[in-house]
Image: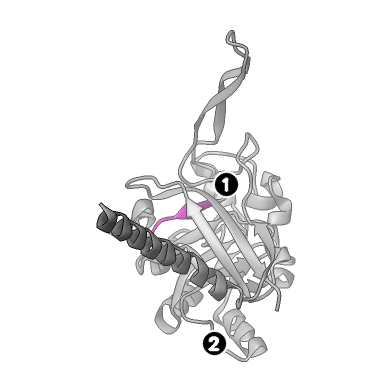
Amino acid sequence: MKTYIIFTFLLFTLMTCKNKTATTMPLETSSTKTKAKAIIDLSHAYSDKTIYWVTAKEFKLDTVFKGQTDKGFYYAANNFSTAEHGGTHIDAPIHFAKNAQTVDEIPLEKLIGPAIKIDITSKCSTNPDYLVSIDDFKDWENAHNTTIPSGSIVLLETGFSKYYPDKVKYLGTDERGDHAVKLLHFPGLSPEAAKWLVEHRNINSIGIDTPSIDYGQSEYFQSHVALLEQNIPAFENLTNLDKLPSNGFEIIALPMKIEGGSGAPLRIVAIVYDK
């Protein structure tokens, strides 16, 4: 009996030490890291004002119940319906690439990690059809005396989020239907720049503060194809990019995990660190 008690005590002591080690080590490691300065929400809320592609089903929220129950407690519940692609959302690779990753198959490493921002607001302010160029990426690299870091999440700031949810200013039209596609005007990434990123840089994902990675007047969505064929997901309809520095921050972009989904609503935040 005495032997059993001693063995139990030793086992408990070892387990306690092991748990303390597991808890303490990350804390010691984290104390050496730079502290977070701010957490910035880069997502638009979903509502009846949410902007969708002109041919997509818009967001609808139906109240199931809201108020005091006969049991004496308050209760609220809703049903919602929405297209995959609308508001702040993710384009999974399969959206434009056969047999590519669906939303639930995208590795978390593609959605969480260090990021940079390319600011082209001055060029987009006078040209709603502006195409982000290879030179825009090279200008960023020259300004920071480095290449775009391997494994980066690249965000493109056009300044168009300031127009959201005004459809005419943000999309170029408030009309809906197939005919409205030709009326779309907003900046995007040029196919040449998309191919350059794929061939000469190693990025994990890309995002933009407009309705699409391809600009409004695109007919063949070549930038989508170039990126998504390489399993590089895209984040669209972002906001608050003006609150981010050009580098030195991280992104957490977690979409609704829709099995087989080509896209999904996205909650995306940036963690900005003190330098």
In the rendered image, residue 117, in percent from the top left (x then y), is placed at 62, 72
In the rendered image, residue 217, in percent from the top left (x then y), is placed at 55, 59
In the rendered image, residue 98, in percent from the top left (x then y), is placed at 28, 58
Classify 123 as above or below 48. below
Q: Residue at x 63, y 50 (%)?
A: 171
Q: Residue at x 68, y 56 (%)?
A: 161
Where does the C terminus fall, quadrant-wise? bottom right
Which mark is first along the chain, 2 or 1? Answer: 1
Kind of element beneath mark 2: loop
Q: Which of the two residues, 141 or 211, is positioned nearer the viewer here? A: 141
Q: Which of the two residues, 78 or 139, is positioned nearer the viewer here? A: 78
The answer to whether any part of residue 15 appears in the image is yes
Q: Residue at x 60, y 44 (%)?
A: 51
43 sits to left or right of 229: right
Classify 13 as above or below 262. below
253 sits to left or right of 200: right
Q: Which of the two residues, 202 or 188, is positioned nearer the viewer here? A: 202
Reading the image, the residue beneath label 2 is: 147
Identified by mark 2, the residue type is Thr
Q: Which label belongs to residue 87?
A: 1
Identified by mark 1, the residue type is Gly
Magenta region includes residue 274: no
Q: Residues within 10 Å of mark 2 (few under 14, many from 20)?
A: few
Choose top left, top right, bottom left or bottom right for residue 239.
Answer: bottom right
How far is disc 1 from disc 2 in space, using C-alphas? 31 Å
Tag count: 2
Choose top left, top right, bottom left or bottom right for residue 240.
Answer: bottom right
Classify 176 as above or below 153. above
Q: Residue at x 46, y 78 (%)?
A: 197
Dominant secondary structure (helix, strand or loop) of the stretch shown in magenta: strand
Q: Which residues are magenta?
A: 89-93
